[in-house]
Image: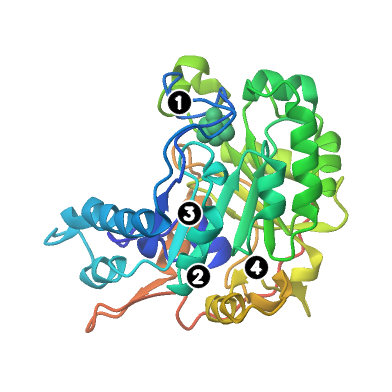
Amino acid sequence: MIRGEGGCYKLKFYGIMSNQCMQMTTSISCANRCTFCWRGYKAPVSKDWKWGVDDPITIFEESLKAHHQLLVGFNGSATANKTAYQKSKEVRHVALSLTGEPIIYPRMNELLIKFNQNHISTFIVTNAQYPDQIRDLNPITQLYASIDAPTKELMKEVDRPLFPDFWERFNQSLDYLAQKKQRTCVRLTIIKSINDILPEKYAQLIEKGNSDFIEVKAYMHVGPSRERLSQDNMPLHEEVVIFSKQLAQHLPGYEIVSEHIPSRVVMFAKTKFKREGIWHTWIDFEKYHELVNSEKEFTADNYCRRTPAVGLSGTGTLERMPDEVRERYLKERELIFVDEKTEEMDFYKGQETSPSPSLNISK
Ligand code: SF4
């Protein structure tokens, strides 16, 4: 984004400016040892929190400092867009995921208050092994739960969980996810020839969690996961699209909305987010902050806005991108508008939302 090369899928799907997004975790420990994880097996694993607890204010301040330090190399870089770099100093979103299981940090709700007060929107990704923490979590902008396999047996193989009652914990987590009032999302990480099966069983689990959104994303062959899986386990974007279409056939309450080819991810939303034929999956951040800081009751319906670009090409990867897909991808990048005089960067400036194309999921 800072180099003007486009944002990540969270920008395209939800309107998060990538250069203003901080990625951090509140716990590097985890109760799983997923085969597809980019962590090594030396990374800490534990069922319970057994360490000291940092103060939420310290975590807030130090993570922002570390984020700025990480990006300081762009200052003065000939390839960086100056405005985009300057803007990166003003963090507007935090993705609490990255590595480990963030939700077990014992003072998470206090940290969330700090982010809310500072108008920083929040995403948390949980492995769905801590149902009570999901139940007790304060409102956040979007809560993710991972569904890494369609059956208990396969989940044991893919996630290698520490908890003997991992399946019960997972199902209880989905029940609590379904009770959340704010935006929720279910994430499927597709590992080719391993968990890309039984879409009808995935669909049953998704319906249990009743999430607002679904992301079906390719496993990425990176980090120590390369010692456990082969490059052939990384699906092409086309394969993610095919699996998504199979899944869509079992999920009447959802439709495929969009894709992000470089990330090999397809996004679904509940049809209630399509208002008068126009998708509203972007987040109205101003509204969210107003609501969350007002302590009024509010729901996912109260802070969404129009999605500027939707649709599915259904084909293409960066490596083997056919011409027409390359063209489409480049067009996507062009949607980031940079004013030549001011170097001001705006995503989708002046773009009208296109009506959703009718997607033929049977193809
Ligand atoms: S739950 Fe997440 S952090 Fe934990 S092992 Fe699995 S992928 Fe890695």
Can residue 207 be seen at all in this image of the molecule? Answer: yes
User: Relative to 321, does residue 41 appear above or below in the rendering?
Assistant: above
SS state under label 4: loop
Q: Earlier in the sequence, mark 3 or mark 2?
A: 3
**Between marks 3 and 2, how big is the CA–CA gap?**
13 Å
Check disc 3 and report the residue beneath it.
Answer: 95
Q: Earlier in the sequence, mark 2 or mark 4?
A: 2
- Answer with the quarter of the image where residue 279 lies: bottom right
Residue 54 located left or right of residue 126: left
How dense is the environment of label 4, judged by Cα within 10 Å: few (below 14), some, or many (20 and up)?
many
Asked if the residue under mark 1 is in contact with the one under mark 4, i.e. CB atoms within 8 Å, the reply is no
How dense is the environment of label 3, judged by Cα within 10 Å: few (below 14), some, or many (20 and up)?
some
Residue 135 located left or right of residue 354: right
Q: Earlier in the sequence, mark 3 or mark 4?
A: 3
Look at 64% across and 23% down and name the residue there: 161
The amino acid marked with disc number 4 is: Thr
Check disc 1 and report the residue beneath it.
Answer: 44
Q: Earlier in the sequence, mark 4 or mark 1?
A: 1
Residue 328 point in image, percent of width and height: 51, 58
Check disc 2 and report the residue beneath it.
Answer: 116
Check disc 4 and report the residue beneath it.
Answer: 281
Q: Earlier in the sequence, mark 1 or mark 3?
A: 1
Front of the two marks 1 and 3? 1
